[in-house]
Image (cartoon, rainbow, N blue to C red):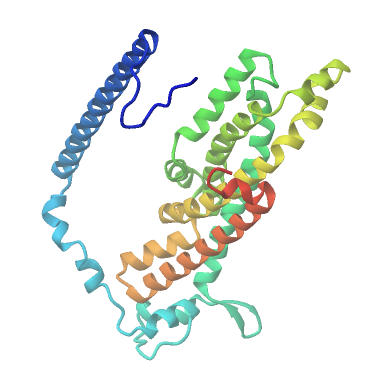
Amino acid sequence: MSETILPGNPAPLSRELGVVHAHYRSLLRTRRLYTLLVGGALLVVLSASLWFANASNAGAFFDRLPYFFDFFIHFQPDEAMEIVRALFDLPSPLADGSFKYNYEEGRVYLLGDFYLPEYFYQMLVTINIALVSTIFGVTFAFGLCFLAASNVTGSRPIRFVVRRFLEVLRAFPEIVVAGMLVAILSVGPIGAIVAVSLHTVGALGKLFYEVTENADGRADEGLRSVGANWFERVRFAFVPQVMPNFVSYALLRAEINVRASTIIGAVGGGGIGEVFRLSIGRDHAAKTYAIIILLFATIIGIDAISGALRKRLVGPSAFQFGG
């Protein structure tokens, strides 16, 4: 006959269970101690970093913090409609011959009187930089990832060289590479495309070979058993498994590259980033806010399209908690 153990009056543990329970309690105390120590160390490092940053800042960050919103308060267009006029290159009633209100001069005429507003054209340049860079990056990352995957390439020297190469490509931020290339190739989108492409190869190459290493190896074993060569194994055993994830990562990287291309434009890479730097540097509030609105709308649109495509590729369950 089994005994009923009441929640409020548990039965005494046996000697063996008592030892296990005591060991568990000891591990729990140790884990909590380590958590407190790590949390305290991070707090100390964060405080020291903030102090150093504040001491190094020319304007004393914490002293200037109460004036944080002063820029937005004083940086206002003369009229709210000036933002719309700047966005669509419409004539301004405030035009005085200066660069501040020369919206019409930026028009890009396509056919007769039909034109594309300057900032829309520059946004297309930025998107073009991002898409071309993504295509180059995906192409080279796809070719290199299988050489870096341990379950596809058995040669350690080859894997070592390819992985280190990918690390070098993603070690430097795009804006640093773009700054050097602008000095070599002059101002324009070409340097931006090269910079973003190199970083994309390094970043996607790592993601791709990690996905490949997690692929099911049974198809590869079957192809090996019938004498398939390396290219046949990659084509028929791995590519069908990893392609949905590859495309998903590529779409995600395209979103990132749009943002990166915008930032690179500020250092001479062309596109919307360059005109944004010029407008805010010249204190042209209407133009600056028009570019911000266009950027915001473009990023939201690209994120929505990319998210919908990725959901169709990998299935909605991958986007659900616990899916």
Judged left or right of residue 96, residue 265 is: right
Task: Return the residue nearer the eye: 258 or 305.
Answer: 305
Above or below 10: residue 250: below
Residue found at the far bottom of this picture: 93
Above/below status of 12 relative to 117 = above
The picture quadrant where one finds residue 24 is top left
Query: Can you say whether 67 is above or below 86 in the image?
Result: above
Query: What residue is drawn where x is 31% and y is 14%?
Result: 22
Location of residue 160 (image quadrant): top right
- Residue sitting at x 58%, y 35%: 207
| 122 relative to 144, above or below | below
Q: Residue furthest top?
A: 15
Residue 87 percent coordinates (x, y): 46, 77
Picture mark count: 0
- Please tell me in which quadrant of the rendered image residue 99 appears: bottom left
- Locate residue 74, reporting x and y percent: 22, 73
Q: Return the residue found at the far right.
A: 226
Taking depth in this image into account, of 35 and 55 the one nearest to the observer is 35
Name the one closer to the observer, 166 or 116.
166
- Residue at 85% across / 16% down in the picture? 225
Q: Position of residue 69 (x, y in %)?
A: 21, 65
**Residue at the extreme left of the image, as rendered:** 63
The residue sitting at 53% across, 50% down in the picture is 257
Q: Nearer the viewer, residue 76 or 244?
A: 244
| Image quarter in which the C terminus is found | top right
